[in-house]
Amino acid sequence: MNGEAARQSPLSAEQRRKVLRSVMILLAVIALFIALFINKLTSPVLLSDEQLKTQGAFLFDNPRSFKDFSLVDFHGEAFTPANLAGKWSLVFFGFTYCPDVCPTTMALLNRFYREQQQGPFAKDLQVVMVTVDPARDSPEKLLPYVSFFNPDFIGVGGEFLNLHRFATQLNIPFTKVPGGGDNYQVSHSGNVAIINPQGHYVGFFRAPLDLMNLKITYESIRRSRD
Protein backbone atom coordinates (compact mmCIF):
# COMPACT_ATOMS: atom_id res chain seq x y z
CA MET A 1 0.00 0.00 0.00
CA ASN A 2 2.71 2.39 0.93
CA GLY A 3 4.70 1.41 -2.19
CA GLU A 4 1.71 2.10 -4.45
CA ALA A 5 1.17 5.47 -2.86
CA ALA A 6 4.82 6.36 -3.41
CA ARG A 7 4.57 5.46 -7.08
CA GLN A 8 1.54 7.71 -7.51
CA SER A 9 2.92 10.62 -5.55
CA PRO A 10 3.55 13.81 -7.56
CA LEU A 11 7.08 14.99 -8.53
CA SER A 12 8.90 17.12 -6.07
CA ALA A 13 9.38 20.81 -6.75
CA GLU A 14 13.03 20.22 -7.63
CA GLN A 15 12.14 17.45 -10.08
CA ARG A 16 9.53 19.62 -11.75
CA ARG A 17 12.10 22.39 -12.19
CA LYS A 18 14.53 19.95 -13.83
CA VAL A 19 11.88 18.61 -16.19
CA LEU A 20 10.75 22.11 -17.10
CA ARG A 21 14.35 23.19 -17.70
CA SER A 22 14.95 20.18 -19.98
CA VAL A 23 11.77 20.87 -21.97
CA MET A 24 12.70 24.54 -22.40
CA ILE A 25 16.19 23.63 -23.62
CA LEU A 26 14.72 21.15 -26.09
CA LEU A 27 12.23 23.70 -27.39
CA ALA A 28 15.00 26.31 -27.75
CA VAL A 29 17.12 23.87 -29.77
CA ILE A 30 14.17 23.05 -32.03
CA ALA A 31 13.40 26.76 -32.51
CA LEU A 32 17.04 27.42 -33.40
CA PHE A 33 17.06 24.70 -36.05
CA ILE A 34 13.78 25.99 -37.49
CA ALA A 35 15.17 29.55 -37.62
CA LEU A 36 18.35 28.37 -39.34
CA PHE A 37 16.30 26.39 -41.85
CA ILE A 38 14.02 29.33 -42.65
CA ASN A 39 17.01 31.65 -42.92
CA LYS A 40 18.65 29.32 -45.43
CA LEU A 41 15.48 29.23 -47.51
CA THR A 42 15.02 33.00 -47.50
CA SER A 43 18.64 34.18 -47.70
CA PRO A 44 19.73 35.81 -50.96
CA VAL A 45 21.27 33.39 -53.44
CA LEU A 46 24.93 33.99 -54.27
CA LEU A 47 26.01 31.97 -57.29
CA SER A 48 29.53 31.20 -58.42
CA ASP A 49 30.57 32.19 -61.94
CA GLU A 50 30.10 28.57 -63.04
CA GLN A 51 26.64 28.45 -61.51
CA LEU A 52 25.78 31.73 -63.22
CA LYS A 53 26.76 30.20 -66.57
CA THR A 54 24.42 27.27 -66.08
CA GLN A 55 21.63 29.84 -65.54
CA GLY A 56 22.54 31.79 -68.69
CA ALA A 57 24.66 34.65 -67.25
CA PHE A 58 28.28 34.99 -68.40
CA LEU A 59 30.72 37.29 -66.61
CA PHE A 60 34.15 38.27 -67.86
CA ASP A 61 37.23 37.82 -65.71
CA ASN A 62 38.07 41.48 -66.36
CA PRO A 63 35.48 44.22 -67.06
CA ARG A 64 35.90 45.84 -70.48
CA SER A 65 36.09 49.58 -70.98
CA PHE A 66 34.38 51.26 -73.91
CA LYS A 67 36.02 53.21 -76.65
CA ASP A 68 34.28 56.55 -77.06
CA PHE A 69 30.99 56.44 -78.94
CA SER A 70 28.30 58.94 -79.84
CA LEU A 71 24.75 57.77 -80.47
CA VAL A 72 21.33 59.45 -80.23
CA ASP A 73 18.50 58.58 -77.87
CA PHE A 74 14.82 58.58 -78.83
CA HIS A 75 14.49 62.21 -77.74
CA GLY A 76 17.19 63.25 -80.19
CA GLU A 77 19.70 63.84 -77.38
CA ALA A 78 23.29 62.60 -77.44
CA PHE A 79 23.86 59.16 -75.93
CA THR A 80 27.49 58.66 -74.89
CA PRO A 81 29.43 56.58 -72.32
CA ALA A 82 28.30 59.09 -69.69
CA ASN A 83 24.75 57.74 -70.05
CA LEU A 84 25.96 54.33 -68.90
CA ALA A 85 27.64 55.61 -65.73
CA GLY A 86 26.07 55.51 -62.29
CA LYS A 87 23.61 52.71 -63.01
CA TRP A 88 23.50 49.06 -63.89
CA SER A 89 22.44 48.94 -67.54
CA LEU A 90 20.95 46.06 -69.49
CA VAL A 91 21.45 46.71 -73.21
CA PHE A 92 19.44 44.85 -75.82
CA PHE A 93 19.85 45.26 -79.59
CA GLY A 94 16.70 45.04 -81.70
CA PHE A 95 14.50 46.95 -84.14
CA THR A 96 10.92 48.08 -84.36
CA TYR A 97 10.05 45.93 -87.41
CA CYS A 98 11.27 42.77 -85.68
CA PRO A 99 8.43 40.21 -85.80
CA ASP A 100 9.22 37.95 -82.86
CA VAL A 101 12.46 38.01 -80.84
CA CYS A 102 12.42 41.75 -80.12
CA PRO A 103 8.86 42.17 -78.82
CA THR A 104 9.17 38.95 -76.82
CA THR A 105 12.44 40.07 -75.25
CA MET A 106 11.21 43.59 -74.54
CA ALA A 107 8.05 42.24 -72.89
CA LEU A 108 10.14 39.93 -70.71
CA LEU A 109 12.53 42.75 -69.78
CA ASN A 110 9.52 44.84 -68.79
CA ARG A 111 8.29 42.09 -66.45
CA PHE A 112 11.78 41.73 -65.00
CA TYR A 113 12.17 45.49 -64.57
CA ARG A 114 8.80 45.84 -62.81
CA GLU A 115 9.67 43.04 -60.40
CA GLN A 116 12.99 44.72 -59.62
CA GLN A 117 11.16 47.92 -58.70
CA GLN A 118 9.74 46.06 -55.69
CA GLY A 119 13.16 44.96 -54.43
CA PRO A 120 16.44 46.40 -53.12
CA PHE A 121 17.81 47.25 -56.57
CA ALA A 122 15.00 49.52 -57.74
CA LYS A 123 16.85 52.84 -58.02
CA ASP A 124 19.85 52.11 -60.21
CA LEU A 125 18.70 49.85 -63.04
CA GLN A 126 18.10 51.01 -66.60
CA VAL A 127 17.12 49.09 -69.71
CA VAL A 128 18.34 50.31 -73.10
CA MET A 129 17.25 49.10 -76.53
CA VAL A 130 19.68 49.96 -79.31
CA THR A 131 18.36 49.70 -82.85
CA VAL A 132 20.12 47.61 -85.48
CA ASP A 133 17.97 49.21 -88.18
CA PRO A 134 18.83 52.93 -88.19
CA ALA A 135 17.47 53.42 -91.71
CA ARG A 136 13.92 52.88 -90.50
CA ASP A 137 14.20 53.43 -86.72
CA SER A 138 14.32 57.19 -86.33
CA PRO A 139 13.92 58.72 -82.85
CA GLU A 140 10.28 59.38 -83.72
CA LYS A 141 9.82 55.68 -84.49
CA LEU A 142 11.78 54.40 -81.47
CA LEU A 143 10.00 56.56 -78.89
CA PRO A 144 6.50 55.05 -79.09
CA TYR A 145 7.84 51.55 -79.68
CA VAL A 146 10.16 51.41 -76.67
CA SER A 147 7.75 53.35 -74.43
CA PHE A 148 4.99 50.87 -75.24
CA PHE A 149 6.89 48.19 -73.34
CA ASN A 150 7.92 50.47 -70.50
CA PRO A 151 8.02 54.29 -70.27
CA ASP A 152 11.25 54.07 -68.26
CA PHE A 153 13.12 52.19 -71.00
CA ILE A 154 15.52 54.10 -73.25
CA GLY A 155 15.67 53.80 -77.03
CA VAL A 156 18.93 54.54 -78.84
CA GLY A 157 19.83 54.99 -82.51
CA GLY A 158 22.33 56.85 -84.62
CA GLU A 159 24.43 56.51 -87.73
CA PHE A 160 24.97 52.97 -88.96
CA LEU A 161 28.75 52.94 -88.50
CA ASN A 162 28.48 54.34 -84.97
CA LEU A 163 25.90 51.70 -84.07
CA HIS A 164 27.99 48.97 -85.63
CA ARG A 165 31.09 50.03 -83.70
CA PHE A 166 29.13 50.11 -80.45
CA ALA A 167 27.58 46.70 -81.13
CA THR A 168 31.01 45.26 -81.91
CA GLN A 169 32.30 46.42 -78.52
CA LEU A 170 29.45 44.46 -76.94
CA ASN A 171 29.98 41.37 -79.13
CA ILE A 172 26.55 41.80 -80.74
CA PRO A 173 26.63 40.87 -84.43
CA PHE A 174 23.89 42.07 -86.76
CA THR A 175 23.37 42.09 -90.49
CA LYS A 176 20.62 42.97 -92.94
CA VAL A 177 18.93 39.91 -94.41
CA PRO A 178 19.09 40.04 -98.25
CA GLY A 179 15.80 40.47 -100.09
CA GLY A 180 12.48 41.62 -98.73
CA GLY A 181 12.52 45.07 -100.31
CA ASP A 182 11.35 47.72 -97.86
CA ASN A 183 10.16 44.96 -95.52
CA TYR A 184 13.62 43.50 -95.00
CA GLN A 185 14.62 41.85 -91.75
CA VAL A 186 17.80 42.24 -89.68
CA SER A 187 19.53 39.22 -88.19
CA HIS A 188 20.98 39.99 -84.76
CA SER A 189 21.97 38.46 -81.44
CA GLY A 190 19.35 38.30 -78.70
CA ASN A 191 21.89 38.49 -75.88
CA VAL A 192 21.53 41.27 -73.31
CA ALA A 193 24.74 43.07 -72.33
CA ILE A 194 25.43 43.90 -68.67
CA ILE A 195 27.15 47.23 -67.92
CA ASN A 196 28.10 48.20 -64.38
CA PRO A 197 27.86 51.70 -62.81
CA GLN A 198 31.49 52.38 -63.75
CA GLY A 199 30.42 52.11 -67.38
CA HIS A 200 32.25 48.83 -67.97
CA TYR A 201 30.97 45.90 -69.98
CA VAL A 202 31.05 43.05 -67.46
CA GLY A 203 29.13 40.24 -69.18
CA PHE A 204 25.86 39.25 -70.78
CA PHE A 205 22.67 37.25 -70.41
CA ARG A 206 22.51 34.63 -73.11
CA ALA A 207 19.43 34.32 -75.30
CA PRO A 208 16.81 33.01 -75.06
CA LEU A 209 16.06 34.68 -71.76
CA ASP A 210 14.15 33.06 -68.93
CA LEU A 211 12.50 35.38 -66.41
CA MET A 212 13.30 33.33 -63.30
CA ASN A 213 16.92 32.73 -64.32
CA LEU A 214 17.31 36.39 -65.22
CA LYS A 215 16.03 37.46 -61.81
CA ILE A 216 18.19 34.99 -59.84
CA THR A 217 21.40 35.69 -61.75
CA TYR A 218 20.98 39.47 -61.85
CA GLU A 219 20.35 39.71 -58.12
CA SER A 220 23.29 37.42 -57.39
CA ILE A 221 25.54 39.57 -59.57
CA ARG A 222 24.37 42.70 -57.82
CA ARG A 223 24.94 41.29 -54.34
CA SER A 224 28.41 40.01 -55.15
CA ARG A 225 29.65 42.95 -57.23
CA ASP A 226 28.00 46.10 -55.93
Image (cartoon, grey):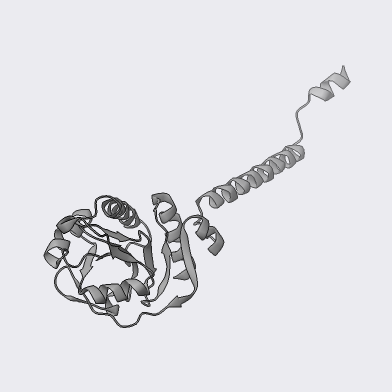
User: Quick one: quadrant of the N terminus?
Assistant: top right
- The answer to whether residue 126 shows anywhere in this view is no
Residue lying furthest front in this view? 179
Point out residue 58 in the picture as x, y percentages from the top left corner.
47, 64
The one nearer the camera, 192 or 26, is 192
User: Could you tell me which residue is drawn at 17 percent across and 55 percent down?
Assistant: 183
The one nearer the camera, 216 or 187, is 187
Instruction: Reply above or below: 44 against 123.
Output: above
In the picture, measured across the screen, residue 88 lies left or right of residue 221, that is left
User: Quick one: quadrant of the C terminus?
Assistant: bottom left
Point out residue 54 in the picture as x, y percentages from the top left corner.
52, 56
User: Could you tell me which residue is drawn at 24 percent across and 79 percent down?
Assistant: 70
Residue lying furthest left in this view? 140
User: Could you tell me which residue is drawn at 39 percent across and 51 percent down?
Assistant: 211
Quarter of the image holding residue 87?
bottom left
- The answer to whether residue 148 shows anywhere in this view is yes
Point out residue 91 in the picture as x, y percentages from the top left corner.
32, 66
Quarter of the image holding residue 205?
bottom left
In the picture, measured across the screen, residue 111 lies left or right of residue 217, that is left
In the picture, measured across the screen, residue 11 lies left or right of residue 215, that is right
Quarter of the image holding residue 198?
bottom left
Residue lying furthest bottom in this view? 68
Instruction: Reply above or below: 63 against 137.
Output: below
The one nearer the camera, 97 or 52, is 97
Instruction: Reply above or below: 53 against 134.
Output: above
